[in-house]
Image (spheres, rainbow, N blue to C red):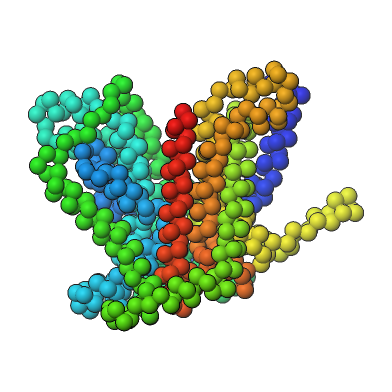
Amino acid sequence: MSAAASRPWWLGLGAWLVPVLGFSVIPVVALLWRGLGHAEAGGLGWLLAERGALVHTLAIATGAAVLAFVAGTPLALVLFRTDLPLRGAFTVLFTLPSAVPAFIWGMGWLSLASPRAGYLNRLLGDGAFDIYGPVGIAFVEGVAGLPLVLLAGAAALRRVDPAMEEAARVCGASTARALLTTTLPLALPALLSGAVMVFLMAASSFGVPYLLGVSASPPTRVLTTRIYELVLMGGEEGLGRAALLATSLLLLAPVAMLATWALGRAGRVRLSAGKGLSARPFPLGRARAGVTVAVGLIATVLVLLPLGAILLTSFQRSFGAELAWEELTLAHWAGVLLEPRTLHATGRSLLLAAGAGALVCLLGLAAAVLQRGLRRLGAGVEALAVWPYAVPGTVLALALLLAFSRDLRFILADRVAFVLALAHTPWLLLIAYVAKYLALGTRNSAEALAQLDASLAEAARVSGAGPWRAFVDAPLPMLRPALTAAFVLAFLACATEITMSVLLVPAGTEVLGTLLFELQSYADPAAAAVLACAFIVLVGVGQALLALLTRHAQGER
């Protein structure tokens, strides 16, 4: 590529790097610098005093990962490698926790297993269940992370060579033995990789530990809730300590990602692409009815029961009221959904989510194009775009809060001054959304762009179109389904986001996530349940739209 031809690529890379470096990389690096500086200034002793939060974080994350792996491994084998009836419906149910915020699952289990007011305790007797504390937090986080293990296992099972399974069956192995001796060892690295991602997700979670840990007796504090408490405390000392804890939490991300990468390499080595044969589902035989009932029971307990508890709570006059018809009312639905406070928060959330979705698509598409045009730097561009997704939301929010706590002034040629004032504005929350979910736009755009033939743009160039016009007329229309899917995913994630919103929303301003958090934590759980139902409906509509987009794209192919 000549110097003249490469100049537009370098200019585009520079224009893309300015927002990416300025709003994601530099703030996190500054946070690390401040956290390490606080440690050198004597903060290590205080960090040792906070070892309880670190121990709780590691124990809860490990418990959640173990639960997701233990439950997800047999479910993956049964759902994706046997002739189980209603496999499609069960798959939708078990992957639903990945789309609904974990905070809402915590609300559901709180309605079920609160020591005094929980439905299960009222039916079975006081004290039968207690969802508060580290065990309850790990359980909810494990259920919320179950889809990560299931989806990783599904992808691995599709690549298992069916000839090996057929050989085991020919040698006389039963269905269960063939699955355990041939299929499971091959899919194990991918399943463990999903469990590592559950560990990282649980370690960086804020909503569930706050909901089920702060009110526990004694309180169960983790790194994210301690960071939140220190930020609320304010002052240089509090923010310095929060930065030190955030640094400790951030160090877990590369360790987990390294483990995932190592397991992924092991999986790629051990899993073959097959020999052009389609794998036939293992027949369950006489055990078909029993397995179906068992899977249905698990889906009911883990998914349907907490959702039903939230719905029932939304109709109660007050949380903990007697389970009787006269105690059920629709007052909360009209009072919450039509309240001006809710309408303002909804409008603000939808605007922020739509803006973030559009920017995620735009910057993600630019990253994918730069990856293809600058092949040597493609891996670096992808890494810069994707890595914030692995950064805990609490850490990213704190980094932006510290980086833009003061107005930034830029003076050009001693004449023109630019002032960047983001502190205490919704713009900072928009930036956090875009930085966090830029990976969605980048991955979707890169995968779609890789499937297009470069001759499309070349034909437009031969016809006299410039580089920009050639891209707009030829490849861009074919990228529309992938960009639309990325927009919907980013929109849903931002509209239902809680962790970063709680830290970054200015005082006197609310979005749906902070309103749900406040209603559940400090005000009225019954009113919060109404808002949680609205969240679930929003997620359901978004998932249905994604399914339609996927079918439409497959039909066009």
* Residue nearest the observer in this picture, 353 or 547: 547
Q: Is residue 190 left or right of residue 549?
A: left
Q: Residue furthest top?
A: 462
Q: Is residue 372 left or right of residue 146?
A: right
In the image, is residue 447 above or below residue 341? above
Q: Residue at x 71, y 39 (%)?
A: 14
In the image, is residue 404 above or below residue 316? above
In the image, is residue 248 above or below residue 16? below
Q: Residue at x 38, y 77 (%)?
A: 329
Image coordinates of residue 298 in percent, x first then y, are 23, 55
* Residue nearest the observer in this picture, 306 or 241: 306
Q: Residue at x 27, y 73 (%)?
A: 119
| The N terminus, quarter of image | top right
* Residue nearest the observer in this picture, 119 or 263: 119
* Residue nearest the observer in this picture, 349 or 423: 349
Image coordinates of residue 400 in percent, x first then y, are 62, 58
Q: Is residue 193 left or right of residue 464?
A: left
Which of the 4 quarters of the picture holds residue 132? bottom left
In the image, is residue 192 above or below residue 379? below
- Looking at the image, can residue 503 be seen? no
Which of the 4 quarters of the picture holds residue 163? top left
Q: How many marks?
A: 0
Image coordinates of residue 133 in percent, x first then y, are 33, 70
- Looking at the image, can residue 469 be seen? yes
Image coordinates of residue 453 in percent, x first then y, are 56, 23
Q: Residue at x 15, y 39 (%)?
A: 284
